[in-house]
Image: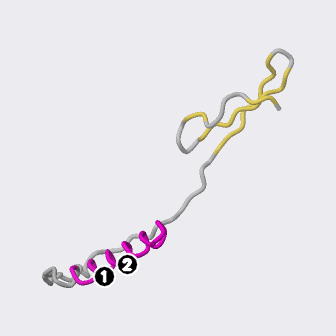
Amino acid sequence: MFSVKKKLVALLLISMLTLSFAVPAMAVEAVAVEPVNSTVEYQEISPFFEQTEIFWRTYRGHLQMRVWSVTRGRWLTDWISA
């Protein structure tokens, strides 16, 4: 008799054949696409680096640092022992 693996392979092949005949039968309509407006002005994208500042402090006898984002206006890290 057939093993489970052979049955699964046969079922997979039958499914693939059935689907391959069913897909072309579907009607697909072509849609006209209008060309993109060529009068659009292109702007140059200029990447920039994030500007950061490092702040140092001595807290309970330990040197610590923290990074401030000048670009975003917020702290990027908590106080880190150096």
Residue 82 magenta-highlighted:
no
> Looking at the image, which residue sits at the far right?
61
Q: If the image is split into quadrants, where does the N terminus sit?
A: bottom left
Which residue in the structure is indicated by mark 1? 17
Q: Residues within 10 Å of mark 2 (few under 14, many from 20)?
A: few
Q: For the residue labelled by badge 1, is the local secondary structure a helix, a strand or a loop? A: helix
Residue 64's place in the image compared with 5, above or below, is above
Q: If the image is split into quadrants, where does the C terminus sit?
A: top right
User: What residue span does the magenta drawing correspond to?
Assistant: 1-22
Q: Residues within 10 Å of mark 1 (few under 14, many from 20)?
A: few
Please indicate whether residue 4 sits to the left or right of residue 75 in the image. Answer: left
> Looking at the image, which residue sits at the far front?
1
Mark sitting on residue 13: 2
Residue 74's place in the image compared with 42, above or below, is above
Q: Quadrant of residue 60?
A: top right
Q: Position of residue 19 (x, y in %)?
A: 27, 77
Q: Position of residue 63 (x, y in %)?
A: 83, 26
Residue type indicated by callout 2? Leu
Q: Residue at x 46, y 73 (%)?
A: 6
Q: Position of residue 45 (x, y in %)?
A: 46, 67
Residue 50's place in the image compared with 53, above or below, is below
Residue 8 magenta-highlighted:
yes
Residue closer to the observer: 45 or 30: 30
Magenta span: helix, strand or loop, mainly?
helix
Q: Position of residue 62 (x, y in %)?
A: 85, 22
Residue 38's place in the image compared with 58, above or below, is below
Residue closer to the observer: 31 or 20: 20
Residue type indicated by callout 1? Leu
